[in-house]
């Protein structure tokens, strides 16, 4: 299976972040609610019995400030400064254990027993779970030191200590590990789906390429089959200029159709150059002028632009000049060759009045609209409705006046 693309990795991270956001909201809510609803009443209720109530209260306020600042950072998507905040919380942990006093050691007034673990979870969110275990281990060591310092060494006190450590640590660890696992699972599933989508897209592209190759093979076969069959059956004379012209046209179309399969920046220019190269090899001097860069056009549109020019080029004599004028919304391809006796090239309808003369033969490049061409006796055709990807029809103009032949195709975005 191919690796997921960078875009897929970005999507996977976004999905994991969205999945993680719910867990972040839950963790922030639990920590602050516990701090307000359980720890604060315990501190206020036991205030006279605390050994150093100001220290305990200050520790509660510092922890509340850390929780609010961390919660804001987490909900906005940014990680908090874990190391510095973890050190602050451990200092608060040790100060409150020392300031609470022996009388409230195992009560809710010593709020760091149960409440501080949730703030550990917040400040190291998105870090490895080992970080949380280290902080909880440090918390357990601080608590054990306070228990021993206050002389609570009886088996019952040590049992209570063990129960407090286990009970106040297991739930935050479960929430932290579960949130990390869900985010990783969402990320992995998204990457798998993206990879599967990439495989499906490549399969569709391969099938499309296969269909295009088959269609191109059918066109290539149809281009040469008729003239080759006539030659094989003896129905065509190789010395006949018309037969030779048909052979040249078939060869030019074969060359252009083969060029369609090439991966090049400008497919239309590449296909026109292929036809021009073949004509030049057959001894026809040809000048190819390209102005501008054609936009990306579907194969069918490129064929409609190039086929009439290929047919006219096969019938050209003495010299030829091909011009390509391209812009983002219009492409004009024209061919000028000397006129000579004989019919129009195969594939081009003859003009309605072949004796029509013009004092100003058309220059290379964009020409008058079809109505003007009809007044001069030219033949104008529009190759059907717009292609689905072409966004515009292809117009075809062919004229001759006894001095030159002029063929033009034009695509315009609609």
Image (cartoon, rainbow, N blue to C red):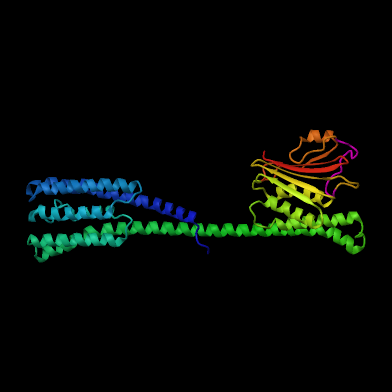
- Image side of residue 136 versus residue 312, left or right: left
Q: Is residue 5 visible?
A: yes
Which residue is drawn at the image coordinates 20% and 52% (left, top)? Answer: 88
Location of residue 112 in the rendering, given as x and y in whole percent from the top left corner:
18, 53
Among all residues in the image, which is located at the extreme bottom? Answer: 155
Location of residue 230 in the rendering, given as x and y in whole percent from the top left corner:
89, 60
Residue 148, image quadrant: bottom left
Please, what is the dominant secondary structure of the magenta stretch? loop
Task: Please provide the residue range marked out in magenta.
Answer: 345-358
Q: Nearer the viewer, residue 323 or 52?
A: 323
- Which quadrant of the figure contains the C terminus? top right
Q: Is residue 120 visible?
A: no
- Image side of residue 18 versus residue 161, left or right: right
**Per the image, is 350 magenta?**
yes
**Per the image, is 356 magenta?**
yes
Residue 48 vertical placement versus 374 (above, below) = below
- Image side of residue 81 versus residue 195, left or right: left
Location of residue 394 in the rendering, given as x and y in whole percent from the top left corner:
73, 43
Location of residue 113 in the rendering, given as x and y in whole percent from the top left corner:
18, 55
- Image side of residue 28 versus residue 165, left or right: right
């Amino acid at each position: 299976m191919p690796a997921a693309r960078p875009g897929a990795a970005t999507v996977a991270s976004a999905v994991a972040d969205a999945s993680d956001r719910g867990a972040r909201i839950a963790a922030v809510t639990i920590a602050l609610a516990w701090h307000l609803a359980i720890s604060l009443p315990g501190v206020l209720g036991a205030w006279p019995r605390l050994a150093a109530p100001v220290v305990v209260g200050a520790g509660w306020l510092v922890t509340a400030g850390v929780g609010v600042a961390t919660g804001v950072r987490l909900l906005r998507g940014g990680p908090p400064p874990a190391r510095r905040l973890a050190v602050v919380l451990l200092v608060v942990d040790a100060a409150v254990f020392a300031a609470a006093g022996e009388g409230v050691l195992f009560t809710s007034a010593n709020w760091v027993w149960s409440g501080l673990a949730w703030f550990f979870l917040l400040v190291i969110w998105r870090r490895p779970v080992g970080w949380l275990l280290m902080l909880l281990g440090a918390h357990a060591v601080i608590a054990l030191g306070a228990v021993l310092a206050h002389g609570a060494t009886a088996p019952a006190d040590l049992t209570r200590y063990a129960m407090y450590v286990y009970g106040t640590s297991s739930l935050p660890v479960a929430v932290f590990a579960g949130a990390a696992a869900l985010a990783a699972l969402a990320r992995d599933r998204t990457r798998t789906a993206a990879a599967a989508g990439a495989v499906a897209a490549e399969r569709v592209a391969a099938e499309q390429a296969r269909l295009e190759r088959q269609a191109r093979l059918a066109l290539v076969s149809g281009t040469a089959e008729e003239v080759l069959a006539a030659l094989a059956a003896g129905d065509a004379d190789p010395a006949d200029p018309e037969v030779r012209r048909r052979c040249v046209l078939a060869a030019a179309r074969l060359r252009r159709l083969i060029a369609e399969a090439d991966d090049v920046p400008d497919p239309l220019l590449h296909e026109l150059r292929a036809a021009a190269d073949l004509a030049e090899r057959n001894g026809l001097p040809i000048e190819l002028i390209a102005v501008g860069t054609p936009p990306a056009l579907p194969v069918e549109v490129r064929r409609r632009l190039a086929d009439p020019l290929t047919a006219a080029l096969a019938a050209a004599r003495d010299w030829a000049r091909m011009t390509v004028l391209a812009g983002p919304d219009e492409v004009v391809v024209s061919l000028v060759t000397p006129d000579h006796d004989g019919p129009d090239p195969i594939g081009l309808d003859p003009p309605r009045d072949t004796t029509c003369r013009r004092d100003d033969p058309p220059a290379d490049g964009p020409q008058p609209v079809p109505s003007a061409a009809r007044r001069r006796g030219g033949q104008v055709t529009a190759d059907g409705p717009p292609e689905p990807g072409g966004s515009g029809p292809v117009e075809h103009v062919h004229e001759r006046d006894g001095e030159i032949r002029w063929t033009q195709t034009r695509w315009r975005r609609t």
